[in-house]
Image (cartoon, rainbow, N blue to C red):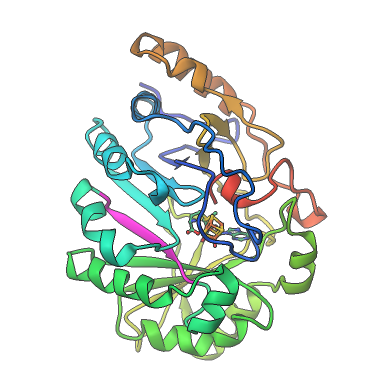
Amino acid sequence: MRPLHDRQGRTYPYLRLSLTDLCNFNCNYCLPDGCEDHRHRQALSVAEIKRLVTAFSAVGVEKIRLTGGEPTLRSDFNDIVSTIKSIPGIQKVAMTTNGYKMDQRVESWLAAGVDQINVSIDSLDPRAFETITGHDRLQEVLTGIDKAFANGLSAIKVNAVLMKGVNDIQLGAFLEWIRHQPITMRFIELMQTGDNGRFFNQFHVPGRQIRDQLLAQGWVRMTRKKDAGPAYEYCHPDYQGRIGLITPYSKDFCKDCNRLRVSSQGHLQLCLFSESGHDLRRLLQDDSQQDELIREIRSVLRLKVDGHFLDQGYTGGTQNLAQIGG
Ligand code: SAM
Ligand code: SF4
């Protein structure tokens, strides 16, 4: 079948699927007051997820990233992973997690079939980690990373949202940490969402400040692969780890964007900052609707615009990234 593509010729081998918009952390840039709605909105079931991913795989999607909210809050998380993994054409299952109970659970995630783990650590200082996330759990996450390596994972990506005066001044500690570990430490520029306008104005810092420090210390920007994500990666001969910079406010950030997102309610979202999603759930109720589902996915994709307008303060319908799966 013809692979998915849009009017700009961008192809789509990768889907981010949110398993829940609930989270147990209170990151100050995302959900400072925690989850307001404790009633679990009925997220996609394993059967619905199977139909959804089967359709995407038929049009060339090879990699699924499970995200949220916190995806591991789903008690059927491992079942979801192994179900997706068994769908023909799906080559990789990745996940993004806050690392909650990672020390106890990572073995079961890997056994279920997870191929890649991105874990969020905004600071390596336990007190700062607690201030940012509301949880004194840094050690548990670090032990989880050690266990992932011990269980055969060859590399891990760690995400940190850059915040002025908080962790942009801790670059040295992050660099020391990755000196002898195959970790790609990714600094993500804080993005403005509907909920965090004041926080954004106070703490946003451009990624180029980190870039300039890296270049001054002998780090070198690596050539981007054609299917590379939004990060620019840097390497240094004295370090086993790498640095990634994700700078959504930079010019041309959207040019190569081939991200597709489906929310935990089954809405296909073409951009993190879209006004709303396109409901696919009505076509996930039985196997006989697969052809229509594929037609719908193709036709929605024609609506994908060239870029977002974040630099003009336009945040679309996105109140926080937990809602859509960052
Ligand atoms: N709960 C999981 C986690 O934190 O890794 C997965 C979902 S979270 C929304 C995915 C990523 O988005 C995390 O790395 C988080 O730090 C990042 N993120 C959340 N809000 C953000 C914002 N306003 N700007 C930039 N990154 C953000
Ligand atoms: Fe939860 Fe992830 Fe948002 Fe933090 S960034 S509040 S862990 S969804």
Image quadrant of residue 269? top right
Judge whether 282 appears above or below 147 on screen: above
Q: Name which residue lies at 61% across and 56% down.
A: 34
Judge whether 17 appears above or below 285 on screen: below
In the image as oriented, which residue stretches furthest toward the top? Answer: 288
Q: Position of residue 201 (x, y in %)?
A: 79, 68
Question: Ligand 1, what quadrant?
Answer: bottom right
Asked if residue 11 lies left or right of residue 109, the reply is right
Q: Name which residue lies at 17% across and 65% down.
A: 151
Q: Position of residue 304 (x, y in %)?
A: 63, 33
Q: Quadrant of the N terminus?
A: top left
Q: Nearer the viewer, residue 102 or 154?
A: 102
Q: Position of residue 36 (x, y in %)?
A: 64, 48
In the image as oriented, which residue stretches furthest toward the front? Answer: 39
- The verdict on residue 89 being magenta is no
Q: Main secondary structure of the magenta part?
A: strand
Asked if residue 292 lies left or right of residue 288, the reply is right
For the image, the number of numbered tags is 0
- The verdict on residue 119 being magenta is yes
Q: Nearer the viewer, residue 269 or 20?
A: 20
Q: Position of residue 181 (x, y in %)?
A: 30, 79
Asked if residue 291 lies left or right of residue 135, the reply is left
Q: Name which residue lies at 27% across and 60% down.
A: 106
Q: Magenta part of the protein: which range?
A: 114-121
Q: Name which residue lies at 42% across and 15% down.
A: 285
Judge whether 74 appears above or below 134 on screen: above
